[in-house]
Image (cartoon, helix red, strand yellow):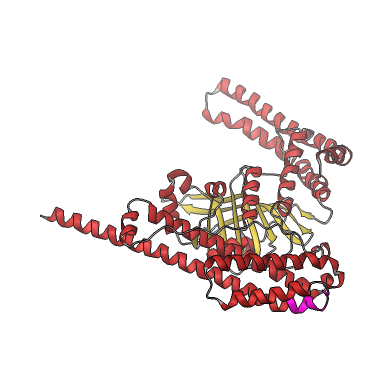
């Protein structure tokens, strides 16, 4: 008489544990996605300052700077599909990358402390975005394992959970800002 | 630091001193051996008259007496070896480095690393090197930490917590949390079950799964913040730490705390000392010490600590 009760009890307990672990994994993914947004926002916040600093020096890049400001406004307004968002991000990264290269032609700007700090903050923001994306991917991988592996996949099916896609993370090569700063 | 130039440094700067020191070493060894031989002769003599087990102690006693006679020479040899050989080798690697044969990593730094949580009863170390390479402050020394237990008979036993080289450097990024990298034992032994168990252990923070599969096989990472851990441990740094581990071939423990990096390299030997069983003119000994020095100083390059492109200068 007691054996069936124990079996039912154990099965119910296992169900609760697996159910909760799946919900936990799903929430981790959402949380990680949120932190990517936070890091992106941090980078957007740097843009006005950057544009303001380089504007006085960069006479030939006016167009690019206007474009950057425009892209930022669009990125921050929200309400975009994730594909659009990614493409916007890529354009923005590329445009800023262009500015960072163009700086080579303006020695005064390159030597200014203000710009040096901005460039450092920019690198930091990029590295943090990359870290947030990697965290998101790790959370997604754990979640996907839960969705696809036996026995949690049974519960995932009941909840209509499906696989999520990971970010593609581009590798960017970075160099030291200037040799001068190395030996301060 | 290349092999060729170290060769010429070796023959012009180190070899003449080593030859002098070798004479000292042989002197000490001769006395020890003579004492041992004397003891042995005595044993045979005593053994012929009375068959006693205690007679075996005599050769050891003899060797001890031999050593005691040459104790002064031994001390001179030891201190000159450090002062004239090891100190020179440190300077050869980088002129700005300073070397203190009797110094060691501060206990405060050891505790700050939080690498070994067992409370320490004996804290010993020597061969302390410190300096600034480029923008990066480094220090390292040999370290041996132990704790003691007392069994029911009142006998004290000493257990090693850590023995090896303890390295400290200023890290090139700012961060607030704590990150720990430890050799992965559970996952290696128990596979994904081990990994699940690691997730439950929260004493050093959350388990952080890294995307580098080779790295994950060797190490387990705990951190107070998932995103920050990945900010500090960029994909490149993961590879660099893995390469460093393969280069040392020993167990390594790494922690990142308060914008510093701490690295503990487990070793089962005492480095930078004279051995009475090996000639000082044996190049292998000097080369091995040199490779350990280069390994430690090389961490700055290996982990790319002089790349200062983040807000921390």
Residue B167 % position (x, y): 67, 55
Farthest residue, direction right: B12
Instruction: Say which quadrant the N terminus of chain B sits in.
Output: top right
B283 versus A17 height, above or below = above
Quarter of the view holding residue B44: top right
Q: Is residue B107 left or right of residue A12?
A: right
> Is residue B115 at least partly visible in the picture?
no
A27 vs B9, nearest the viewer: A27
> Is residue B97 at least partly visible in the picture?
yes
A122 vs B79, nearest the viewer: A122
Q: Residue at x 81, y 39 (%)?
A: B3
A119 versus B147 height, above or below = below
Residue B150 % position (x, y): 46, 53
Q: Residue at x 66, y 53 (%)?
A: B125
Q: Residue at x 62, y 48 (%)?
A: B242
Q: Residue at x 70, y 73 (%)?
A: A67
B244 vs A20, nearest the viewer: A20
Farthest residue, direction top: B48
Quarter of the view holding residue B14: top right
The boundaries of the magenta stretch are A51-59
Residue A184 % position (x, y): 81, 67
Residue A180 % position (x, y): 84, 64
Residue A86 sits inside the magenta stretch: no
Instruction: Say which quadrant the C terminus of chain B sits in.
Output: bottom right
Q: How many marks?
A: 0
A124 versus B184 height, above or below = below
Residue A53 sits inside the magenta stretch: yes
């Amino acid at each position: 008489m007691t054996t069936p009760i124990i079996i039912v009890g154990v099965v119910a307990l296992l169900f609760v544990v697996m159910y909760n672990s799946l919900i936990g994994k799903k929430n981790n993914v959402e949380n990680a996605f949120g932190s990517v947004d936070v890091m992106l926002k941090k980078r957007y916040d740097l843009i006005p300052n950057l544009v303001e600093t380089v504007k006085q020096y960069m006479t030939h890049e006016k167009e690019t700077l206007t474009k950057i400001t425009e892209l930022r406004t669009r990125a921050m307004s929200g309400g975009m599909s994730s594909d659009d968002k990614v493409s916007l991000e890529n354009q923005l990264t590329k445009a800023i990358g262009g500015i960072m290269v163009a700086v080579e032609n303006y020695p005064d700007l390159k030597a200014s402390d203000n710009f040096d700090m901005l460039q450092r903050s920019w690198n930091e923001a990029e590295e943090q975005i990359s870290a947030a994306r990697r965290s998101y991917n790790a959370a997604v991988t754990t979640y996907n394992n839960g969705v696809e592996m036996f026995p949690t996949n049974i519960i995932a099916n009941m909840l209509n959970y499906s696989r999520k896609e990971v970010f593609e993370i581009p590798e960017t090569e970075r160099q030291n800002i200037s040799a001068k700063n190395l030996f301060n | 630091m290349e092999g060729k130039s170290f060769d010429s440094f070796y023959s012009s700067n180190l070899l003449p001193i080593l030859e002098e020191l070798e004479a000292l070493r042989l002197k000490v060894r001769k006395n020890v051996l003579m004492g041992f031989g004397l003891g042995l002769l005595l044993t045979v003599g005593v053994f012929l008259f009375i068959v006693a087990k205690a007679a075996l102690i005599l050769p050891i006693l003899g060797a001890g007496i031999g050593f005691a006679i040459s104790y002064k020479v031994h001390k001179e040899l030891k201190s000159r070896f450090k002062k004239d050989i090891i100190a020179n080798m440190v300077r050869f690697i980088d002129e700005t480095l300073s070397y203190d044969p009797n110094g060691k990593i501060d206990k405060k730094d050891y505790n700050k690393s939080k690498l070994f949580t067992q409370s320490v009863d004996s804290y010993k170390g020597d061969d302390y090197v410190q300096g600034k390479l480029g923008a990066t402050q480094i220090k390292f020394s040999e370290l041996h930490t132990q704790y003691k237990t007392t069994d029911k008979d009142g006998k004290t036993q000493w257990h090693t917590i850590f023995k090896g080289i303890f390295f400290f450097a200023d890290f090139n990024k700012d961060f607030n949390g704590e990150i720990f990298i430890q050799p992965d034992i559970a996952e290696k032994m128990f596979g994904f079950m081990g990994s699940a168990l690691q997730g439950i252990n929260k004493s050093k923070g959350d388990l952080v799964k890294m995307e580098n599969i080779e790295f994950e096989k060797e190490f387990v990472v705990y951190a107070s913040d998932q995103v920050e851990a990945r900010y500090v441990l960029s994909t490149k740094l993961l590879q660099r730490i893995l390469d460093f581990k393969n280069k040392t071939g020993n167990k390594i423990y790494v922690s990142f705390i308060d914008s510093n990096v701490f690295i503990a390299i487990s070793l089962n030997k005492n480095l930078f000392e004279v051995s009475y069983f090996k000639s000082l003119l044996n190049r292998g000994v000097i080369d091995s010490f040199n490779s350990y020095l280069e390994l430690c100083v090389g961490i700055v390059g290996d982990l790319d600590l002089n790349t200062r492109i983040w807000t921390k200068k």
